Image (tube, rainbow, N blue to C red):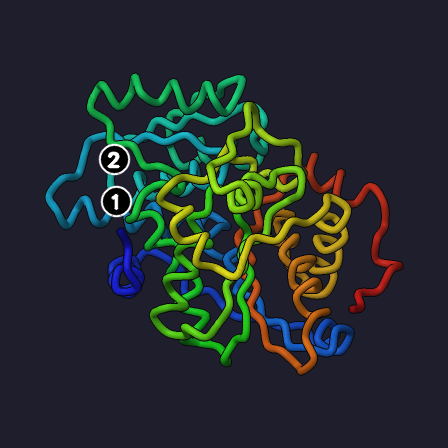
Amino acid sequence: MNTPDHIIAAQSRIAGFVHRTPLMESGTLNAMLGHRIVFKCENLQKIGAFKVRGAMNTLLTLKEQGAMPERVTCFSSGNHAQAVAYGAKILGLKATIFIPQTASSLKVAATRAHGAEVVVTKTRQEAESAVQAVIDQGAVFIHPYDDDRVMAGQGTAALEAFQDGPAFSAVFAPCGGGGLVSGTWLAAQATSPETKVFGVEPLNANDAARTLRDGKIFKWEQAPDTIADGVRTLYVSERTLAFLKQTAGVLEVSEDDIIYWTQWLTHLLKLTIEPTSAGCMAGVVAYLRAQTTPQTVLVILSGGNVAPETQAQIWAEDRLGTVPCL
């Protein structure tokens, strides 16, 4: 099982292959809410998402161990697919990627652009099943979140923020399979153990929250229906659940709130931000409403790959007329 030291080692390992992304703030938003909100901009990362961290840490670990394969494979709804394809290209490997047809068209095209063989399946379940045939032919499988090496790589985003930013009372990260939240918790233990770590997921895709409430892993039968395509995972794993149990909790947010905050963060930060990460702000607001003193919190903007059809959904109705407040 991972320890905080694994996050620190991963940071050193991948340093030459990923961006040390900036921290940003909006003075306007801080004034509106009466608290300091700091954003870790992984939407400005290579491939436009934090996922490249976990993929590169896994591949570079294999290289260190002298176990580099000729081909790698994975299943993914988008950003992990791009990350594995990018890493394979950089290291001269072949890649076969299985993506469900519900995935963002932008992410599918970007994965192909990195030279990977992309196989589109009807469902997430089909993607997970089809990958086994490629593994049987000798490819190394890189799981989107149920892998210690992937988790350690993802945690380096928060580790950088803790190193570069002010002291944070809480950090908020999107929760799909739980790899980013788990890595973030480990990063906090390494450098800022007093910081509370929250996962945030759509109410429509709340497998992590339901799992924590029920005490057993809840699994969707098909990809959940949410605009936040980056967290359309079917379930968290036993590996990530062990860390999720140690966080401050997983907050559930509505589709309306996800769209609202995607519009507002796009407007205030002048960045392209995936609904998956913008939804964290609804969790931030819920947290801040319970506070009696000014807080400084961190939000991990996990990605910025937004397809035209998703942008159309986001901007179908103008939400900027309602100003953020607590």
What residue is at 65 percent from the left and 48 percent from the top?
275
Q: Position of residue 274 (x, y in %)?
A: 61, 48
Between the C-alphas of marks 2 and 1, the distance is 10 Å
Classify 214 as above or below 20: above
Residue occupying the far right of the picture: 321
Q: Amino acid at mark 2?
A: Leu
What residue is at 61 percent from the left and 53 percent from the top?
251
What residue is at 38 percent from the left and 41 percent from the top?
238
Q: Residue 93 — which label?
A: 2
Please identify the quadrant where the C terminus is shown: bottom right
Q: Position of residue 243 (x, y in %)?
A: 40, 53
Q: Quadrant of residue 185?
A: bottom left
As drawn, is 221 to the left or to the right of 323?
left
Q: Position of residue 183 (x, y in %)?
A: 39, 56
What residue is at 21 percent from the left and 49 percent from the top?
61
Classify 21 as above or below 70: below
As drawn, is 27 to the left or to the right of 18?
right
Dot 2: what SS?
loop
Asked whether the residues under the numbered discs 2 and 1 touch, taking CB atoms below 8 Å apart as contact, a structural biologist would say: yes
> Is the residue marked by circle 2 packed among few (<14), some (14-19), or many (20+) residues within 10 Å?
some
Q: Position of residue 54 (x, y in %)?
A: 35, 49
Q: Camera-side residue: 115 or 163?
A: 163
Residue 181 visible in the current orientation = yes
Residue occupying the far left of the picture: 66
Q: Residue 59 — which label?
A: 1
**First-in-chain label (2 vs 1):** 1
Q: Residue 127 — which label?
A: none
